[in-house]
Amino acid sequence: MTHPPAEMRAALLAVGKRLTPDRELLMDIIHQNPHMGALDIHRLAQEKRPRIGLATVYRTLRLLEELGVVESERLGEDHSHYEIRGRDHLHLVCSGCGKVLDVSSPIDRAGIACQYGFTVTGARLELVGVCAACRRNSRSRFRSAA
Amino acid sequence: MTHPPAEMRAALLAVGKRLTPDRELLMDIIHQNPHMGALDIHRLAQEKRPRIGLATVYRTLRLLEELGVVESERLGEDHSHYEIRGRDHLHLVCSGCGKVLDVSSPIDRAGIACQYGFTVTGARLELVGVCAACRRNSRSRFRSAA
DNA sequence: ATGGCTGCAAACACTTTGCATCGGC
DNA sequence: GCCGATGCAAAGTGTTTGCAGCCAT
């Protein structure tokens, strides 16, 4: 529980990237706080390393995303949220305040209302994959990472 | 089929808003082109009304969203996409180029691959609604429109 | 004619990038 | 010691806003 980002460190080293204190801290924060924005992550990081810059946060997030260990999402807000890849992606997004709740089990509306106090008014489903054209060009937004 | 935005016009007039040529044109464009970005909409609009400004596009989109007739979404890109509210919200988002396809029937992966040439690699589900706190405050991001 | 609507440009929020310095390997 | 990583600040996007003039009502 202390240092879960073992896979993250491995991913970095696997491509010859350096394991810096900044990156370790950021990986820890991302791992322990689901769907946070870059500015929140930065604010949290500054509590432990006051001199860390926002650019480093963005650069690290982008790097980790390219390595496939984190995933960024626009959850209806005007900024991105970041989380560990492969975790559940069923989110409850409040149309009032934009708050995001995680749901981990297959659910029904009554169950959600009961368990999370969240009233579902609409759904939005995105299937991510590769379209015909990109398949032909074998193009993918992060596959080209050296 | 010629002028489907009848409901849109009604929505405008219902709240005492004016029915201008710019707005009619924009409503037409939005109605006929699903999930387009603001800049695409602007570009299209300029073909018919060269003097239309980008600010008008944004202001109109925001107005129509507040009226509940269109809906904006961040489909993995760094800008918003707009479409008529209530239409299907099952999207196929290409991880290569970001292109978005609409799917209208309940489907399976094999069916999607066959019908749309799109290889599904992951899914993302958002349930939109009202969280407990906002329910208590009866707060909602667009309910407060005058 | 009157008040909302528009174009223009400046302001904004989030994110990326250039450059000199610092530090992991 | 080398080359990558960082901080800072400037540049880049997409979106919003202030203001003077315009046009539906």
Image (tube, coloured by chain):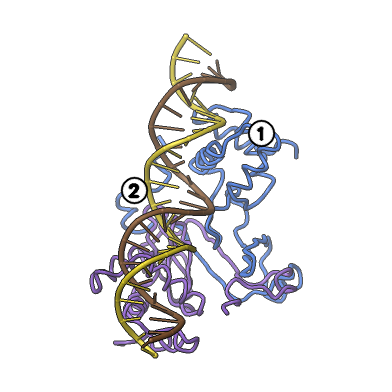
Chain colours: A blue, B purple, C brown, D yellow
Instruction: Write down the residue under mark 2.
Output: A138
Q: Is residue B3 left or right of residue A18?
A: left
User: Could you say which quadrant of the image residue D2 lies in?
Assistant: top left
Disc marking residue A50: 1
Q: Position of residue A110 (x, y in %)?
A: 71, 76
Horizontal and vertical percent position of residue B92: 43, 64
Residue beneath the point at 41% across and 84% down = B18
Along the line of sight, the residue nearer the viewer: B115 or D13: D13
Q: Do tags 1 and 2 sit on the same chain?
A: yes
Q: Residue at x 52, y 67 (%)?
A: A125
Q: Amino acid at mark 1?
A: Pro
Compare marks 1 and 2 and give the one earlier in the sequence. Answer: 1
Q: Position of residue B23 (x, y in %)?
A: 36, 78
Compared to A22, does B135 lie above or below?
below
Whether residue A109 sits left or right of residue A62 in the image: it is right
The quadrant the C terminus of chain B occupies is bottom right
Chain to which mark 1 belongs? A
User: In front of the other: label 1 or label 2?
Assistant: 1
State the residue at coordinates (34%, 48%): A138
